[in-house]
Image: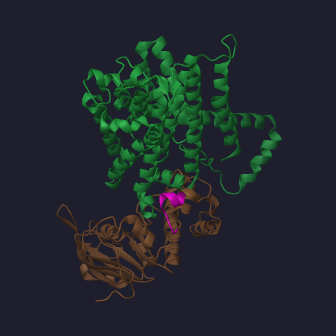
Chain colours: A brown, B green
């Protein structure tokens, strides 16, 4: 099997923590410019999947290929980020003591992010437009000078999405972006992710089925560390195996929120 | 650097580097005369301030708390001390070419590792390189293994304890518990001469100014922002494509070098260096200076080092029993009531004063305040935005 055309390709990946298999012989791949949503009950291995791709967890078994032939397994997190894989965490993680502007500035894609390069570089003129454009995309242009710590929860989530966009990644990994958001914020976040997916690949993990229906074209259901089924959102929601996994929660299938 | 800061720094530099030595050189009858004792004391405090700047870079900016900086201070001080011991030569009590402590420890020949310290140039290099390379090796292992937070603090404290134990041993040929003392000359100048001490003071003050400029240059660069970012969210830094370990290693080495230079300036001015200066307790005291002055401001760290030590020298002469109680109380007080230290408390008071005067003037001229209140009437009233960040 070749990996041509895929942005990320995992083959036979197993990750275990103290004997517990968070991922078990998982096979997963995504096309370029695809917006994919991964759902599944708690403990299904959703976050571990992101950990493996972003270098935080190293599988004991399997292959992880980025793009055509970049093996991610020997690389550290910062090197993987440099290759063009951005990650947005579940709880907002921004630099609260820096301004919103500086948060984005630090995230920009650069030839070198080493100590001596950043010591000598000051304000590179051409970057201002990119930073301003990114802030406009996530709707924080008028708050550029504020410390990020003064933003609301939803704004911090958007700022972090902005920071990941500023990295100019080919693949974005987004972990539960709308947790704790109001309905209005959730709708805006959905639009934001869809616009990002216009020219990048986006992998979203989500619990909120309402939100999944808003953004998803193709859904992957994880269960006990393997792929249970995959397909368009309506098909997946009516799949008897998926209902089985979510049993005891809501059987109707209208809301599989865990 | 903003203009106000540049002006303030220039004034402080003139005062410390030029004015105080001149005051010292004035005849004792002059009202502006500064005694040799005082100037020497200030020289010691300024050496501490150099160390505090480095510690602030590491702790206040990058959020890495080292409880072992006494070790790097000690390495610099011992390097300088070894050279000064060798400069004594046969003028020592036993009139041997060997340092006195070696004579009474029955050491017949100068140990090999002492020999290069005959050279002044080697000594100056060692003052920078020994603490720097040691920090590089130690930091590399610690940061690479992702030891962080309180775990890093604990292993640096263990480092201070083991260094103290090692330097206390006579077998180390470094003078054991008594350390190195009775220095006579430095690069040929007699340490008993007031002019030599004045020169040492001026060099210390100058090094402090340069150290401040270097630290400010770092914090104003993009790397400085990365350091603050590491304190806020190391994970985010890592996933933004930076290696936090390398940045932390860099500041750790810079701060160790500053500590070593501080130690080397301390030794000839105080006239003695013993293992007691590089153990756990002095290392913690150094952290207290930075906390009391205000973390993440550089100025606060230097002021803290100067202020706390001045207080110490006053209290230990006037109320010797109270000093340790005071130090403990100071640390607790800072943690509980002034988490951003002296500088932070002053800044907050200044903001409050400004707000008070502004509201006082606006009640005096009601028409103007009514007009200004009209402006933000679009949308519902908002609380004032948080404009002050605790650590910037």
- Looking at the rendering, which quadrant does residue A250 occupy? bottom left
Residue drawn 49% across and 44% down?
B57
Q: Is residue B329 left or right of residue B112?
A: right
B162 w.r.t. B19: above or below: below
The reply, left or right, for residue A154 in relation to residue B78 is right
Assess whether residue A116 is covered by the magenta stretch. yes
Residue shown at the point (55%, 28%) measured from the top left: B200
**Number of callouts in the render?**
0
At which x and y percent is residue B391?
53, 44
Q: Measured from the top left, where is residue A208 in percent x and y?
A: 39, 69
Q: Which residues make up the magenta segment?
A: A110-118
Which quadrant does the C terminus of chain B fall into? top right
Is residue A114 shown to the viewer in this render? yes
Left or right side of A205 for B391? right
**B129 drawn magenta:** no
Towards the viewer: B149 or B195: B195
Residue reaching furthest to the left: A19
Whether residue A34 is situated above or below residue A149 in the rendered picture = below
| Residue B316 percent coordinates (x, y) | 45, 16
State the residue at coordinates (78%, 44%).
B370
Q: Closest to the observer: A10 or B376?
A: A10
Question: Percent from the top left, x then y, of residue B172?
Answer: 28, 32
Res A245 → quadrant: bottom left
Using the image, determine if residue B390 lies above or below residue A126.
above
Q: Is residue B333 visible?
A: no
């Amino acid at each position: 099997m070749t990996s041509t055309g895929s942005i990320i390709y995992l083959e036979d990946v197993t990750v275990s923590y103290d004997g517990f298999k968070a991922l078990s012989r998982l096979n997963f791949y995504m096309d370029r410019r695809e917006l994919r949503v991964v759902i599944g009950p708690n403990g299904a291995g959703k976050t571990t999947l992101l950990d493996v791709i972003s270098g935080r967890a190293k599988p004991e078994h399997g292959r992880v290929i980025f793009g055509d032939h970049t093996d991610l397994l020997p690389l550290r997190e910062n090197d993987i980020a440099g290759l063009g894989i951005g990650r947005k965490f579940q709880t907002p993680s921004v630099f609260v003591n820096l301004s919103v502007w500086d948060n984005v500035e630090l995230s920009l894609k650069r030839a070198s992010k080493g100590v001596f390069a950043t010591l000598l570089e000051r304000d590179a003129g051409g970057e201002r437009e990119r930073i301003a454009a990114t802030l406009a995309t996530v709707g924080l242009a008028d708050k550029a000078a504020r410390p990020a710590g003064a933003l609301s929860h939803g704004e911090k989530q958007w700022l972090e999405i902005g920071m990941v966009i500023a990295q100019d990644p080919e693949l974005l990994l987004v972990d539960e972006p709308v947790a704790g958001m109001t309905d209005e914020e959730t709708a805006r976040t959905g639009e934001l992710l869809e616009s990002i997916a216009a020219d990048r690949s986006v992998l979203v993990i989500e619990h909120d089925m309402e939100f999944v229906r808003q953004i998803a074209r193709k859904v992957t259901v994880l269960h006990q560390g393997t792929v249970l089924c995959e397909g368009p959102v309506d098909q997946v929601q009516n799949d008897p195996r998926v209902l089985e996994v979510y049993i005891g929660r809501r059987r109707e299938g209208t809301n599989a929120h865990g | 650097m903003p203009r106000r800061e540049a002006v303030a720094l220039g004034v402080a530099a003139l005062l410390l580097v030029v004015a105080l030595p001149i005051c010292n050189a004035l005849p004792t009858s002059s009202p502006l005369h500064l005694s040799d004792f005082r100037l020497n004391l200030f020289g010691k405090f300024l050496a501490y301030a150099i160390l505090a700047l480095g510690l602030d870079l590491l702790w206040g900016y990058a959020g890495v708390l080292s409880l072992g900086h006494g070790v790097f201070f000690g390495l610099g001080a011992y390097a300088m001390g070894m050279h000064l011991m060798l400069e004594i030569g046969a003028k020592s009590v036993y009139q041997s070419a060997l340092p006195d402590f070696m004579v009474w420890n029955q050491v017949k020949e100068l140990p090999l590792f002492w020999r290069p310290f005959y050279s002044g140039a080697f000594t100056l290099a060692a003052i920078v390189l020994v603490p720097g390379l040691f920090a590089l090796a130690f930091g590399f292992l610690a940061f690479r293994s992702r030891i962080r937070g309180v775990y890093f603090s604990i292993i640096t404290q263990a480092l201070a304890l083991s260094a103290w134990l090692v330097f206390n041993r006579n077998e180390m040929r470094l003078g054991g518990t008594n350390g190195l003392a009775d220095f006579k000359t430095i690069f040929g100048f007699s340490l008993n001469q007031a002019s030599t001490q004045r020169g040492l003071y001026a060099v210390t003050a100058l090094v402090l100014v340069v150290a401040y400029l270097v630290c400010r240059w770092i914090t104003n660069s993009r790397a400085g922002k990365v350091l603050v970012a590491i304190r806020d969210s190391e994970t985010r830094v890592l996933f933004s494509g930076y290696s936090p370990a390398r940045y932390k290693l860099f500041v750790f080495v810079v701060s160790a070098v500053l500590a070593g230079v501080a130690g080397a300036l301390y030794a000839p001015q105080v006239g003695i260096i013993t293992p007691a200066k590089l153990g756990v307790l002095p290392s913690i005291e150094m952290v207290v200076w930075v906390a009391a002055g205000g973390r993440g401001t550089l100025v606060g760290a230097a002021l803290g080092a100067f202020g706390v030590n001045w207080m110490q020298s006053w209290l230990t002469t006037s109320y010797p029993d109270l000093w340790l109680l005071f130090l403990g109380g100071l640390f607790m007080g800072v943690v509980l009531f002034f988490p951003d230290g002296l500088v932070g408390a002053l800044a907050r008071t200044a903001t409050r004063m400004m707000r008070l005067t502004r509201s006082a003037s606006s009640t005096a001229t009601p028409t103007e305040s009514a007009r200004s209140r009209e402006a933000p009437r679009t949308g519902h009233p908002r609380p004032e935005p948080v404009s002050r960040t605790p650590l910037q």
